Amino acid sequence: ALVAYRFHAKGNPHAIIDLSIFRLVTFRASVIGGAFMRVAMGATPFLLAMLLQIGFGLSAFQAGLMTFISAAGALVMKTTAPPILRRYGFRTVLLVNAVIVGGSFMAYGLFKPSTPHWIMLAVLAIGGFFRSLQFTSLNGLAYAEIEQQQMSRASTTSSMAQQLVQSIGIGLAALLLHTLMVAQGQTQMTAATIAPAFVIIGAITFISILFFIPLPKDAGDEMNGRDRA
């Protein structure tokens, strides 16, 4: 279907999704590179809920309280993202942060029923902070080279891609759990079944680095007011 649409959209000025904007390195890094981050993000809430409730035996209410701390970390980030981007630039933030975010996903797989709750809360809060920073950076970078007349189509394409890949993330999480159960010869899901899925999700996140490396060092500087001197 994607190949067919590519031929349909080529040279069509009225195409809903303008594929030509993927020639822009910043948009390509944001949408395609960011897709690997968003797939992982789509899978994580599902996997965390399964780990905390089925793996650790927490109630839905308790698990919800545990994961809420990620949102708190994301809220704290909102006030710190602009100065961080001005200080280090989009490219550096995306590259370094991709490693941190991927590592945070993998860290969830180290949780045990005996892990103190305060440690889990700290890891979840830190993960929420850096994930939010990454998505804020990706969303801003998407429009760094977009001309005014392309803005509407760029916004549509970016939004559709985000929704699509997050849905893929949920499906991927379910597929991973089923595959791990079969590989381990289990008939019931346990914490040992779920933990390796976080390692795989974290590894998927690292793929995004390949799309951030080609970014110019000054990518998006005009947007965040960073001094190029």
Image: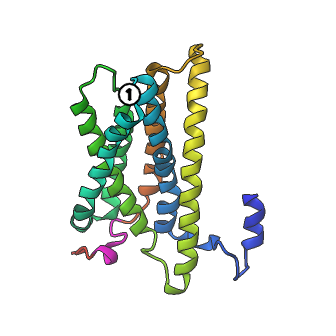
- Which residue in the rendered view is the most extreme toward the bottom? 149
- Asked whether 219 falls inside the magenta stretch, the response is yes
Q: Secondary structure at mark 1?
A: loop
| Image quadrant where one finds the N terminus | bottom right
Above or below, 29 relative to 54: below
Residue at (48, 20) in percent of width and height: 190
Residue at (27, 62) in percent of width and height: 78
Above or below, 181 relative to 172: above
Residue 120: where, in percent of width, then height?
28, 33
How many numbered badges does the structure rendering display?
1
Q: Is residue 162 visible?
A: yes
| Image quadrant where one finds the C terminus | bottom left
Q: Is residue 178 left or right of residue 190?
A: right
Q: Is residue 88 visible?
A: no
Give the camera-side residue of 54 and 122. 54
Residue 228: where, in percent of width, then height?
25, 74
Residue topped by disc 1: 58
Residue at (57, 60) in percent of width and height: 161
Colour convention? rainbow
Residue 143: where, in percent of width, then height?
45, 74
- Residue 172: image quadrant is top right
- Residue 156: image quadrant is bottom right
Q: Is residue 17 left or right of residue 224?
A: right
Above or below, 124 relative to 53: below
Magenta region: which residues?
217-224
Residue at (21, 66) in percent of width and height: 83
